[in-house]
């Protein structure tokens, strides 16, 4: 493996780092939880706030094109997830969009009553799926399997399979193409959560022939805290999906203000309420950082960063247990280690200038975000982690006290 400095000198993405604001004296390895601030976003948001809103007021819906902003953002996201623009909608939260696509999927398989998901899926996916089955009643249920047993669990009772492509704790990655084919061969629909995929590596929903997908805008897409989420519906399903949340922005003619709901054509029927213009504007600006970026190079650098971090940490900190797959094809863009005092270790690490995060019960999680991370950052982070472990800097009561957000 080349030295960190050599790798940075030959990095074809090194100039992209200038598109982001990175605090000095901090190594940020948590972009898989919240992306960093894109350069120039503050000034451009001031224009949105002070000019578009401040002076144009309600005229901004037409004059500033606010009404078309969801479609504009959807087009940029579509390019990152291998989808046609007319198959992506942006708005609402990830949880709300899970509800929307799950209910739409169930409406396409009326004779089946089971939603299947991974037992280790992100909790909100499971909560929403379980809540939907309880709302529907009539024998609907959520069943859980593991990655090892998932294929066998897809039977004639399953209407939809809801999977997150990259496990939020371990970074293990499903084979989207293979799993989607298996799900569909058994008559079910494939729904993919891309929260840890979109913006981290190339995604190609159309090529995989996925049925539905959802994802967030605040991790690798850098849209800001609570940025709007997105959803995808395969073109072949658009005419037949029946939205369970029939809001006015999903109406065929929202400004006709008719009392009866008539769904809009295509993906727009999956819209619900008034677009959140300020947060949408932030996400729209943030997505400009991906302009002219080759996502295959992003993937290549991601794996190089992961390899370097794994190698350095295992050599320096043998007491940490790697839980992320070593094989490139089986992992996303993060590295996770296990330690019984994982929370305290992470707090000590943060106090010493390396920001990662902790996931219960014992996972130290580090996001590899190739657009702004350098090999030198990874090298330095491993060295600081070694000091935290060797000197037992984590072994202090102040680092064991749990904050509200971990």
Image (cartoon, grey):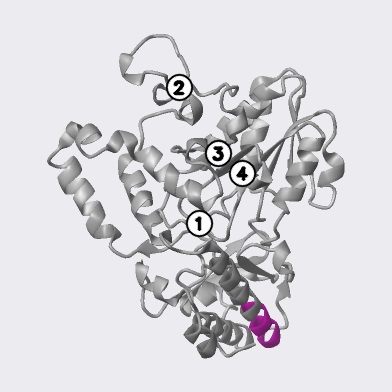
Q: Which of marks 2 and 4 is in front?
A: 4
- Of pointers 2 and 3, the one earlier in the residue sequence: 3
Q: How crowded is mark 1: few (under 14 residues within 10 Å), some or many (20 or more)?
A: few
Task: Look at mark 3 in the image and give the residue it sits on.
Answer: 232
Q: Is mark 2 on a helix, strand or loop?
A: loop
Q: In the displayed structure, would residue 260 be above or below residue 134?
A: above
Quadrant of the drawing holding the C terminus = bottom right
Which disc number belongs to residue 405?
1
Residue 78 appears in the figure: yes
Task: Look at mark 4 in the image and give the residue it sits on.
Answer: 206
Q: How crowded is mark 3: few (under 14 residues within 10 Å), some or many (20 or more)?
A: many
| Residue segment shown in magenta | 309-316
Q: In the displayed structure, would residue 150 be above or below residue 404?
A: above
At x 60%, y 35%, the residue is 234
Majority secondary structure of magenta residues: helix
Q: Is mark 1 on a helix, strand or loop?
A: loop
Residue found farthest to the top: 259
At x 38%, y 38%, the residue is 70
Residue 144 appears in the figure: no
Q: Distance between the residues labelled 1 and 2?
A: 39 Å
Q: Is mark 4 on a helix, strand or loop?
A: helix
Left of 201 or right of it: where is 12?
left
- Of pointers 2 and 4, the one earlier in the residue sequence: 4
Task: Look at mark 2 in the image and give the residue it sits on.
Answer: 264
Q: Distance between the residues labelled 4 and 3?
A: 10 Å
- Residue 313 lies within the magenta run: yes
């Amino acid at each position: 493996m080349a030295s960190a400095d050599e790798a940075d000198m030959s990095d074809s993405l090194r100039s992209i780092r200038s598109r982001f604001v990175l605090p000095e004296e901090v190594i940020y390895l948590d972009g898989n939880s919240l992306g960093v601030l894109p350069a120039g976003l503050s000034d451009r948001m001031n224009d949105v706030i002070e000019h578009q809103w401040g002076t144009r007021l309600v005229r901004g819906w037409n004059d500033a094109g606010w009404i078309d902003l969801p479609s504009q953002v959807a087009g940029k996201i579509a390019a990152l997830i291998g989808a046609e623009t007319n198959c992506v909608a942006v708005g609402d939260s990830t949880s709300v969009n899970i509800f929307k696509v799950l209910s739409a999927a169930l409406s396409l398989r009326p004779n089946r009553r089971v939603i299947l998901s991974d037992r280790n899926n992100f909790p909100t996916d499971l909560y929403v799926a379980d809540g939907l089955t309880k709302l529907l009643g009539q024998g609907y249920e959520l069943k859980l399997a593991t990655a090892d047993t998932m294929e066998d669990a897809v039977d004639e009772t399953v209407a939809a399979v809801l999977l997150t492509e990259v496990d939020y704790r371990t970074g293990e990655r499903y084979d989207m193409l293979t799993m989607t084919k298996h799900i569909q061969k058994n008559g079910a629909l494939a729904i993919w959560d891309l929260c840890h995929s979109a913006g981290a590596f190339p995604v190609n929903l159309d090529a995989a022939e996925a049925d539905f997908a959802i994802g967030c805008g605040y991790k690798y897409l850098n849209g800001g805290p609570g940025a709007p989420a997105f959803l995808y519906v395969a073109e072949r399903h658009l005419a037949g999906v029946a939205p369970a949340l029939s809001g006015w922005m999903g109406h065929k003619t929202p400004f006709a203000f008719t009392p009866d709901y008539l769904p809009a054509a295509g993906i727009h029927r999956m819209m619900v309420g008034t677009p959140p213009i300020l947060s949408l504007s932030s996400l729209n600006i943030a997505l400009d950082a991906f302009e002219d970026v080759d996502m295959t190079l992003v993937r290549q650098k991601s794996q190089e960063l992961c390899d370097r971090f794994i190698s350095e940490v295992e050599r320096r900190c043998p007491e940490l247990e790697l839980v992320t797959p070593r094989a490139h094809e089986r992992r996303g863009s993060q590295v996770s280690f296990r330690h019984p005092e994982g929370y305290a270790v992470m707090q000590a690490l943060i106090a010493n200038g390396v920001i990662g995060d902790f996931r219960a019960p014992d996972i130290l999680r580090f996001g590899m975000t190739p657009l702004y991370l350098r090999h030198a950052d990874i090298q330095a982070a491993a060295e600081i982690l070694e000091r935290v472990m060797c000197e037992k800097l984590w072994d202090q009561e102040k680092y064991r006290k749990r904050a509200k957000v971990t």
